Amino acid sequence: MSESLSLSVVVPVWREAASIQPFLKSLQQVREEGHEVIVVDGGSDDGTAELAAPWCDQVLIGGKGRALQMNVGAEAAQGNVLLFLHADTVLPDSAFEHLQHFFSSRKQWGRFDVQLSGQRALFRVVAWFMNRRSRLTGIATGDQAMFVRTSVFRAVQGFAPIPLMEDVELSKRLCSLSGPYCIGDPVTTDSRRWEQRGAWRTIFLMWRLRWRYWRGESPESLAAAYRVDVRHADR
């Protein structure tokens, strides 16, 4: 008998007290169908971990930084497929049907298309370019809800312990095993940070950081530049 899909949803969080329970409530069907949801907190001081506990299978404490947190969650996972989901991103209703098809395929990993929750036409253009670029390059970002066979993730030793671009770096390594399984039904990512910090400012910042990364600049220096820009935008 062939093995069936067993999913572990790994959610890295930090200071998500205001939204963590509604987000996790949206994943209860996952748990009801026998899959697991693992929340990995990066040391929040707002009660995020305590609020999450009743609505997931495990709450773990990882080092601050998504790469470290996601590795901690993956190490504890029992499923044969890992899905890394940001706490501001909602899966489509068809997600698990598509993931079943992925599991039956020869692909080793994949990602969803993405759409932004805001109503501005600019957000639809941004999402189109993100999805198009990903299909052309095989590179996925965390906003696209990356998924990977657990055995493969562990074989490549997970996310690199870097403060930024961990999703891009992992994508490049996974592409040596197979191209991504691309799911066209999009996840919906909250456009809040784009709206708060300015859509164009956020677009140019991410393009600039990605360009500097491709030119060989270290993730540490890019993370420092990102923090400086965000502080200015949030003032």
Image: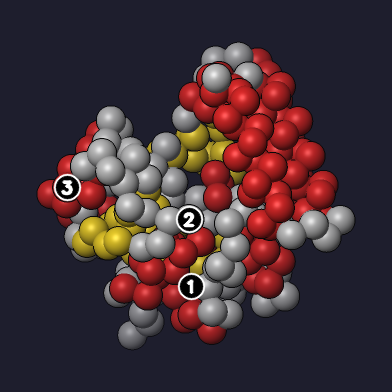
**Foreground: 45 or 70?**
45
206 relative position to 28: left or right: right
Q: Which mark is residue 149?
A: 1
- Residue toward you, 230 or 88: 230
- In terms of image quadrants, where is residue 232? top right
* Quadrant location of the N terminus in the rendered image: bottom left
Q: CA distance from mark 2 to mark 1?
A: 22 Å
Residue lying at the far right of the rendered structure:
215
Of helix, strand and loop, which one carries label 3? helix
Kindly identify the residue that appears in the image at 74 percent across and 59 percent down.
218
Q: Answer with mark 2 or mark 1, whichever residue precedes in sequence.
A: 2
**SS under mark 1:** strand
* Apparent side of residue 66 relative to residue 12 in the rendered image (left or right): right
Decide which of 115, 233 is in the foreground and name it: 233
Which residue is labeled 3 in the image?
A: 50
Which amino acid, by three-letter code, is at mark 2?
Gly
Q: SS of the residue at dot 2? A: loop
The type of residue carrying mark 1 is Arg
- Tags 2 and 3 in contact by the CB under 8 Å rule? no
Task: Assess whether mark 1 and mark 2 are in contact (beta carbons under 8 angstroms).
Answer: no
* C-alpha span from label 2 to label 3: 19 Å
Q: Can you give x and y, in whole percent of width and height, for residue 75 in the image?
A: 37, 75
